[in-house]
Amino acid sequence: MPEWIIVILRSFILILFLFSLVKWLGTKQLSQLNIFETIAGIVLGGIAAVHTMDPETNFFYAILAMFIWFIVPFGIEKLSLKSKRVRDFTEGKTTIFIQDGKIMEENLKKEGYSTDELMEKLRDKNIFLASDVEFAVLEPTGTLNVLPKKENRPLTAKDLGLTIAPDKEPQTIIMDGNMMLESLANASLNPDWLRTELEKQDVALENVFLGQVDDQGQLYLDLYDDHLAVAEASQSALLLATIKKCQADLEIFALASDNQNSKEIYQTCSKNMDQVQSILEPYLK
Amino acid sequence: MTVGTQVKSCYASIKSIEGALESLHETTRNPSLQTAIEDANKLVAQVKNAMHHQVIELMKKEPQFKS
């Protein structure tokens, strides 16, 4: 057999082998790999490179070496999932840089971080004043995670005491003019519903680049033809406005009515509509 | 517009609210919104009943505008 055929064969086999090993190792990102996994990855690549180029070597040795370099990191990873001690050893521990607003100088020195580097990392997190930080910790992967003091954290709905309605994720049901049947089913809708909605907006399915539906069943479209205007979804705003209008009308009736009995009826109705509005407002806004 | 027609149009709006809520109840995937709509619909149904009686009574008072 000519040598070039051997090289081709070896290349294909090693590509397949390497591919399945990498798949097996999991889908961690490169930056999330610990030192051990990084080295294993480089060595696996090196073995594959050497044995594809050189037809003289024993191909069985290549497979064997690659298998060992795969099985040891794989085993350690499985072990470290079970035991905290193994995890601390293989993945390293976190180091606290700032606690209670005070910088821990010894820990900085231990990790080899200068003041400038610490400030750079803080600026990365949009913090320019070290005294704004309540707590900062250096992760084993080398990123610094910062907890700003309470008054420097972004305002949340919880801080304001607002009641926010929980919602569900939107589903993408049209891509490049094609219906996504699976996402439609996830949104518990069917193709007939979609066709009706498109007809309502006078849009052809083929002209839709992207279509999404939110948890209230409202359809949002982006068309290929950007000159065509798409109606904005306003069902919920309209519903809320109608509720408000009815409530106001009932109040006017209550004021205008001379009959004591009807006055009371209108007042209770108005109160009911007020309650309806307060129940639905978080969802419809 | 007489009082009768005003009350009638308000009654119609309430019926449309009821319908819109029911269709929203069908299309939404959000269980908490569904329960909220169920609560709201009970109140709306009460209002609808009361308004229905008002419409009948007003019709007796304003027979010339009966439609």
Image (cartoon, rainbow, N blue to C red):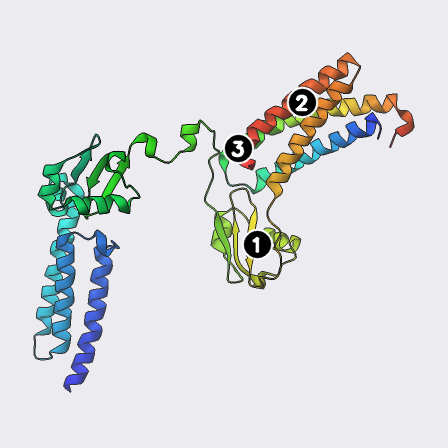
Q: Secondary structure at mark 1?
A: helix
Up-down: is A111 above or below A56?
above
Residue under pointer 3: A282
Dot 2: element: helix
Left or right of A115 on screen, residue A244: right
Q: Position of residue A260 (x, y in %)?
A: 76, 12
**Pointer 2 residue:** A270
Chain identifier of the residue bearing label 1 in the image: A
Q: Position of residue A107 (x, y in %)?
A: 11, 39
The answer to whether residue B49 of the structure is visible from this angle is no
Q: Amino acid at mark 3?
A: Pro
Mark 1 lies on residue: A191
Residue sitting nearer the eye, B39 or A154: A154
Q: Which mark is residue A50?
A: none
Looking at the figure, which quarter contains the C terminus of chain A?
A: top right
Pointer 2 indicates a residue of which chain? A
